[in-house]
Image (cartoon, grey):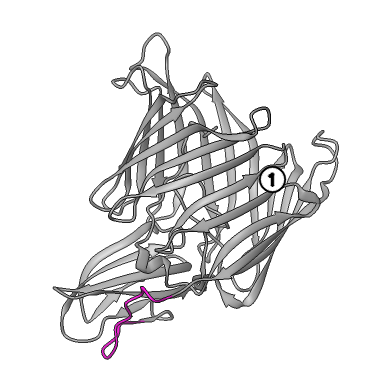
């Protein structure tokens, strides 16, 4: 069943952008058959379906439906039931978008064990002028006037997400909210996320629950991710990559519900992931190896991509400048690895990219009355 709280949303890139990659993720399979995921793409190269089996033995089929702008209109989940030997519709999420392509609202529908879906929640999203999500308001379907939860996001001058605050309404006084949790994000001098702290708040008293820690290799890939609670590592993931293939050449399935593969610290093709867990689930022992996830890929075409010839724009990654070429005024949109718009401007000659932190980006450049072109680049 779909989780009720959507912590982050992403806007998918256009079809042309998605098809710029030379390969795409086909499956994730773990040793000892703990999990198995199969990904399917439609005839326009868009991620359209995922078949997933989790370690609890539950099997799902998810299907994505797109609108004319290649934005996800709905995400529909079917669950396999052994008693009936068939898949049944169990949930659906529907989405609406603002003029910048950001998710503006989401409606949740669930079966609640019945044969038909009923709306369970409505969520709205607010953004700042830089298209950073700054607030998420969550409503029960039976009360669309009063949100039961508000999640607020703050960013630093570099545009990095630095904190999240979760507030919940008083049951008897819906207009009164009390903060119940917060999350803090820390970055190193290279702009890489290295630490995430999760706190609970009760009657004004703040308690650290757990911490997420990230280490990076020399290419900027996340090489290790640890979960820490009470000064003990409770879980760990170790990642391996193909250093000869940049992540910009790979299409990873992205939807409003899940991002397969890391959405940060992913500069090369992800190949394997070792998973470590607390063997006794007591928080007092070192974690031990549990299983390995293997990432498999398939080729994808580039026929739909329109690349500019002649005065083609190009990126000076050292100077963090996009040279547009020619004498025309151009509109420029820059998207991050997860498909979220991170920069938009009108420029002539060059476009300043100095505000972008390290990462993989795709720039969309369009002259007046001209066709758009797409340009992948890496800023270290």
Using the image as rendered, state which of residue 69 and residue 350 is in the foreground: 69
Res. 263 in view: no
**Is residue 100 rendered to the left or right of residue 214?**
left
Residue positioned 56% across, 56% down in the render: 39
Residue positioned 28% across, 54% down in the render: 68
Q: Quadrant of the N terminus?
A: top right
Q: Is residue 306 rendered magenta in the image?
A: yes
Above or below, 63 against 40 in this view is above
Residue found farthest to the bottom? 310
Q: How many marks?
A: 1
Q: Position of residue 275 (x, y in %)?
A: 75, 52
* Helix, strand or loop under label 1: strand
Q: Position of residue 323 (x, y in %)?
A: 30, 82
**Is residue 117 rendered to the left or right of residue 35?**
left
Above or below, 187 against 351 in this view is above
Which residue bears the numbered disc 1?
227
Q: Position of residue 153 (x, y in %)?
A: 41, 42
Residue positioned 26% across, 53% down in the render: 100
Res. 44 in view: yes
Query: Magenta region, mostly helix, strand or loop?
Result: loop
Q: Give the quarter of the image for residue 362.
A: bottom left
Q: Position of residue 276 (x, y in %)?
A: 78, 50
Residue positioned 43% across, 29% down in the render: 109
Q: Give the quarter of the image for residue 201.
A: top right
The residue stretch that appears in magenta = 302-314
């Amino acid at each position: 069943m779909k989780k009720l709280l959507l912590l982050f949303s992403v806007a998918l890139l256009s079809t042309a952008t998605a098809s710029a990659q030379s390969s795409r993720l086909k499956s994730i399979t773990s040793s000892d058959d703990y999990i198995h995921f199969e990904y399917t793409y439609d005839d326009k190269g868009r991620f359209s379906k995922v078949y997933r089996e989790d370690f609890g033995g539950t099997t799902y089929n998810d299907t994505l439906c797109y609108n004319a702008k290649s934005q996800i209109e709905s995400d529909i989940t079917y669950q396999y039931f052994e008693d009936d030997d068939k898949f049944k519709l169990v949930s659906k999420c529907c989405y609406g978008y603002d003029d910048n392509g950001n998710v503006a609202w989401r409606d949740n529908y669930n079966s609640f064990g019945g044969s038909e879906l009923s709306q369970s929640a409505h969520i709205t999203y607010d953004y700042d002028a830089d298209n950073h999500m700054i607030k998420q308001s969550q409503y029960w379907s039976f009360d669309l006037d009063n949100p039961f939860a508000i999640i607020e996001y703050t960013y630093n001058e570099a545009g990095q997400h630095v904190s999240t605050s979760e507030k919940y309404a008083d049951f008897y006084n819906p207009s009164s909210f009390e903060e119940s949790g917060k999350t803090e994000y820390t970055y190193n001098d290279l702009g890489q996320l290295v630490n995430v702290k999760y706190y609970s708040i009760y009657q004004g008293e703040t308690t650290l629950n757990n911490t997420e820690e990230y280490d990076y290799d020399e290419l900027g890939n996340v090489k290790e991710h640890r979960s820490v609670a009470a000064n003990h590592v409770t879980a760990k993931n170790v990642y391996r990559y193909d250093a000869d293939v940049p992540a910009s050449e790979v299409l990873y399935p992205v939807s409003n519900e899940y991002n397969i593969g890391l959405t940060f610290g992913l500069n090369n093709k992800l190949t394997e992931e070792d998973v470590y867990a607390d063997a006794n689930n007591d928080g007092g022992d070192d974690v031990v190896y549990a299983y390995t996830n293997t990432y498999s890929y398939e080729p994808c075409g580039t026929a739909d991509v329109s690349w500019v010839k002649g005065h083609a724009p190009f990126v000076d990654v050292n100077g963090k400048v996009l040279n547009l070429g020619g004498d025309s005024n151009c509109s420029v949109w820059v998207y991050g690895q997860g498909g979220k718009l991170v920069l938009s401007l009108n420029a002539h000659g060059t476009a300043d990219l100095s505000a972008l932190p390290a990462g993989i980006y795709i720039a969309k450049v369009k002259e007046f009355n001209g066709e758009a072109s797409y340009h992948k680049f890496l800023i270290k």
